[in-house]
């Protein structure tokens, strides 16, 4: 049986016309799937009964089920552990920000990039998500919000996985989300976060999708970055920053650089000055993120003084820097923590 959830309208029309079905039936099905959150063909009440049965015999509508939900004490952050029919699980997060509802979506089940500070990589990569599966994460939250008269406003691809290692599916997903018959989400409301896959950054700049690119740097010199992010061996810092510069020039979009601050490792005056030098003259801003402690790695949070001093050194060098407000740390909102806990529990049961 073929999966229909995640097909574009054009793909559905091609499928249906091959079966001598009228074109407008594809539009009706797309509306049920993407606007009315239908879970099965039997929900599609404006389709004749025999057509519903025929479609149900040919196509499956694949959606994840909710395994765990955690809500932060202030009620502004909710985290969902979603499980797909084959058992692959992902985390999706809703953050109710003053400027609207922002969601954080996973692009792979697990990740094999091996970043030292990240729980998503602890169990390696299970598999890539399809465009339909990423869309299902979004629509799961959209459906929930619609019951409160609200909607998803902005999205970051910052959950588990390296989006640019799942390039084709991610680009299909973003185009689908942008369609009027889906969420009609503006590309400017989308941020893609990458560990710095240089050739894919260049490809993305050519897609004609003015999404915001967020590049994880986390260190201002090569050896230190390789210790934190093994991908730096393949795509060194200097090449990553050059790719960021090209992306900004090509798309006219400001590139955001993510920098996790870890006490006594990369939070000193030396690193702040090196970072400023690295980014000088680029249309860029820096997001400083005090690390969530990782006791196994000996990573500790930086002091408030060192965060403030890092920030002000960047500001003196005319680099826009902000310290990311923590949301939902009481519910393990950092990348991959909930999924990792769930998988460890499953392993113990086996
Ligand atoms: S930070 Fe991102 S790229 Fe690095 S291991 Fe975690 S999910 Fe993968």
Image (tube, rainbow, N blue to C red):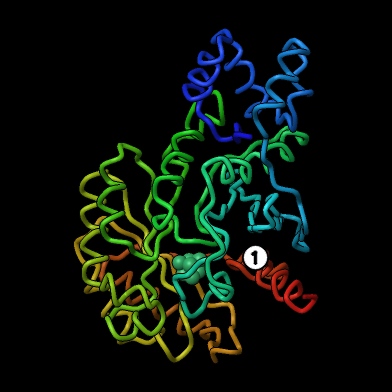
Q: Nearer the viewer, residue 286 or 209?
A: 209
Residue 91 in which image quadrant: bottom right
Mark 1, residue position: 333
Q: Is residue 16 above or below residue 172?
A: above
Q: Is residue 106 above or below residue 287?
A: above
Q: Is residue 49 above or below residue 220?
A: above
Q: Is residue 176 above or below residue 107?
A: above
Report the quarter where the N terminus lies: top right
* Residue 184 relative to residue 271: left or right: right
**Which residue does the image show at 70% across and 19% down from the upper left?**
54
Residue 203, image x, y percentages? 27, 48
What secondary structure is marked by label 1?
A: loop
Q: Is residue 321 visible?
A: no
Residue 150, image x, y percentages? 69, 35
Residue 238 in which image quadrant: bottom left
Report the quarter where the C terminus lies: bottom right
Residue 136 in which image quadrant: top right
**Which residue does the image show at 71% across and 14% down from the upper left?**
51
Residue 268, image x, y percentages? 38, 87
Residue 15, image x, y percentages? 52, 21
Q: Is residue 86 visible?
A: yes
* Residue 171 relative to residue 157: left or right: left
Q: Residues within 10 Å of mark 1 (few under 14, many from 20)?
A: many
């Amino acid at each position: 049986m073929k999966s229909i959830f995640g097909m574009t309208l054009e793909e559905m029309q091609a499928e249906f016309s091959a079966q001598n079905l009228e074109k407008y039936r594809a539009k009706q099905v797309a509306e049920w799937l993407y606007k009315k959150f239908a879970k099965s063909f039997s929900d599609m009440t404006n389709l004749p009964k025999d057509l519903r049965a025929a479609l149900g015999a040919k196509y499956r509508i694949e959606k994840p089920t909710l395994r765990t939900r955690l809500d932060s004490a202030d009620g502004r952050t909710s985290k969902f552990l979603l499980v797909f029919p084959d058992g692959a699980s992902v985390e999706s997060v809703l953050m109710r920000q003053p400027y609207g509802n922002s969601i954080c979506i996973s692009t792979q089940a697990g990740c094999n990039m091996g970043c030292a500070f990240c729980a998503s990589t602890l169990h390696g990569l299970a598999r890539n998500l399809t465009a339909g599966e990423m869309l299902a994460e979004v629509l799961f939250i959209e459906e929930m919000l619609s019951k409160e008269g609200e909607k998803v406003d902005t999205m970051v691809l910052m959950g588990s996985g390296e989006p640019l290692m799942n390039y084709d599916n991610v680009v299909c997903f973003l185009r689908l989300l942008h369609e009027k018959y889906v969420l009609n989400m503006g590309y400017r409301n989308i941020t893609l976060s990458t560990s710095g896959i240089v050739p894919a950054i260049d490809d993305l700049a050519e897609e004609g999708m003015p999404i915001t690119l967020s590049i994880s740097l986390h260190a201002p010199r090569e050896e230190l970055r390789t210790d934190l992010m093994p991908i730096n061996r393949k795509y060194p810092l200097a090449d990553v920053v050059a790719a960021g510069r090209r992306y900004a020039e090509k798309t006219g979009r400001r590139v955001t650089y993510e920098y996790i601050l870890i006490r006594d490792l990369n939070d000193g005056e030396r690193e702040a000055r090196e970072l400023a030098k690295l980014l000088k003259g680029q249309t860029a801003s820096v997001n400083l993120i005090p690390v969530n402690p990782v006791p196994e790695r000996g990573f500790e949070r930086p002091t408030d003084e060192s965060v403030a001093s890092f920030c002000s050194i960047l500001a003196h060098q005319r680099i826009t820097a902000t310290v990311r407000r923590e949301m939902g740390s009481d519910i393990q909102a950092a990348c991959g923590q909930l999924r990792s806990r769930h998988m460890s529990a499953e392993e113990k049961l086996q």
